Image: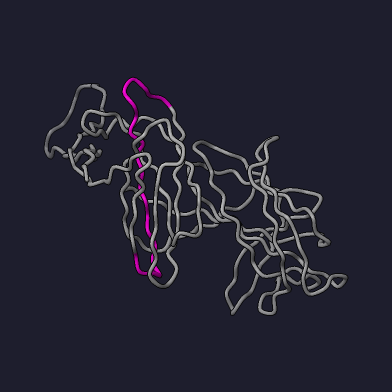
Amino acid sequence: MRKVFALTMVLPLLLAAQGVKITGKQKKVKVKILKESEKEYILLERGKPLSFEIEGPAFLRVYTRLVYPEGTGGTAVYKLILEEDGKQEKIITKETELSDKAYLDGKKLGKWRSFLIEVPPGKHTYRLGIWKSPSPEVAVRIKKTTPPVWKELPPLRPFTLLTAYENEKKTSYYLLKKSESLKFKLQGPRRVKLLVRLNFDDTMGEEAGFTVVVREGESEIQRASFKSYRSELVNWKERKDLVPGKAETLYLEVPKGEHTLEIELLGTLARSAGVRLLVPEITGE
């Protein structure tokens, strides 16, 4: 195990000079003071995956830093592969840039990028390895954390609000018509959660399929198909003529920068759905 040396910014303590009157017109500035600190990482090498066990239910936050090869810099994309219990595999894609506050044995490091592992109940074994990367090394740090706090992100106007009531709890959704789209503006990198409830009317049966497409400009970012069932517990306050289906969840990996995502509803007999986009609150290391 090797250690990554990180520099963290510390806000200066502003001292008020009592009884001293400043008569000049000198420019006032705020000075940032660097404080050295060390955080322990594990050096992940290509072809040598990291294995770890944990008892669930639990949440793990995995912090990663790309180790830049000598003579390289700028923006870089790297992909990790996470395997759960030797069965399920997931590719995690991250985009980073050079950090001016962290280094490893004189090597340049990328800014930290993280992802969340939701561990189900019981004992589980995970393997984390490098899938595709411009570097054969990625520093990783695993930290047990609390469940993420999700914040609602409303779409760009105009939109139509749908209020869902479930067990006396009120939740906001937004109407997505089959012939239209909803637009959301957000900042990456982060992983966001899209909840979709298909709207059943009197002409439909107890179940129906549908497809959700996520686009940015002319590019299709993600597409997922679901089978929905009428909910017996949830109803819309504003639309008594519609019965919401059970909530289906789609996770989206949003890269660095500002993005405007368009959500579309396809491949269904339903005329509309209720949509809700949630963004996690992510803290630093």
Residue 259 picture quarter: top right
The residue stretch that appears in magenta = 54-74
Q: How many marks?
A: 0
Q: Position of residue 123 (x, y in %)?
A: 38, 70
Residue that extends furthest to the left in the rendered view of this protein? 19
Residue 25 picture quarter: top left
Residue at the spot x=37%, y=39% of the render? 46
Q: Position of residue 63 (x, y in %)?
A: 35, 47
Taking the magenta stretch, the answer to whether it contains residue 149 is no
Taking the magenta stretch, the answer to whether it contains residue 68 is yes
Q: Could you say which is closer to the camera, residue 193 or residue 177? A: 193
Residue at the spot x=81%, y=71% of the render? 241
Residue at the spot x=45%, y=59% of the render? 86
Is residue 18 found left or right of 232 in the rendered image? left
Q: Could you say which is closer to the camera, residue 169 or residue 261? A: 261
- What type of secondary structure mainly makes up the magenta span? strand
**Figure check: 85 above or below 112:** below
Q: Could you say which is closer to the camera, residue 275 or residue 84? A: 84
Q: Could you say which is closer to the camera, residue 62 or residue 138? A: 138
Colour theme: one colour
Q: Position of residue 178 (x, y in %)?
A: 79, 54
